[in-house]
Amino acid sequence: MSNNTLEKLKARFNPEAAKGMNEVFQFHFSDAGSYYLNIQDGTLDVQEGEHDDPSVSLSLTTDTLKGIMSGDINGMTAFMTGKLKATGNVMLATKLTSLFPSE
């Protein structure tokens, strides 16, 4: 995942939507390695690598993530067509668009 994509995620983070949340979103990118987002009561920490106990794990390409975040790709459609695989608390993945609203 490029630093540019990470910076965009950080810039779009909505602390209000993350109030009271204590969750870890693990991303496995087929084209860019693994990263996780640690959200703790309105704060965001992005780390490279794998978390020991993520709340939800998502496997996808960086392009699929960009499409979901921009609204060009429906997350549920991506899941149903196999572009996005999720394990753990799958319903958490539906909160990504409120946590990182598009401009």
Image: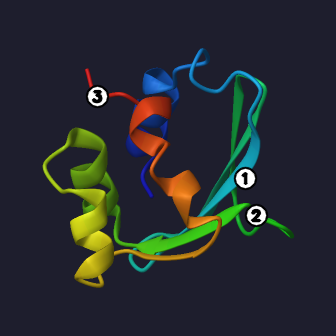
The residue tagged 2 is 54
Label 1: state its secondary structure.
Answer: strand
Query: Residue 95: horizontal and vertical position, in percent?
Result: 49, 43
Of all residues shown, which one is farthest toward the left? 72
Quadrant in the picture for the N terminus = bottom left
102 left or right, relative to 57: left
Q: Which is nearer the N-term, disc 3 or disc 2?
A: 2
Amino acid found under the numbered disc labelled 2: Pro
Q: Nearer the viewer, residue 4 or 74?
A: 74
Q: Residue at x 72, y 52 (%)?
A: 24
The residue nearer to you, when weighing 63 against 98, is: 98
Q: Amino acid at mark 3?
A: Ser
Measured from the top left, where is residue 21 in percent x and y?
Answer: 74, 34
Residue corresponding to mark 3: 102
Q: Above or below — where is 3 with respect to 100?
A: below
Per the image, label 3 sits on a secondary structure element best described as loop
Pointer 1 residue: 24
The answer, for residue 6, to whether it is visible in the render is yes
Answer yes or no: do the residues labelled 1 and 3 have beta carbons within 8 Å? Answer: no
Vertical arrangement, residue 37 with respect to residue 103, above or below: below
- Disc on the earlier residue, 1 or 2: 1
Above or below — where is 50 with respect to 4? below
Instruction: Say which mark, if any, is on residue 64.
Output: none
Q: Are marks 1 and 2 in contact (CB under 8 Å)?
A: yes
Is 10 left, or right, of 49 in this rendering?
A: left
Real-space Cα separation, disc 3 to disc 2, in angstroms? 24 Å
Residue at the extreme top = 16
- Any part of residue 83 in sight: no
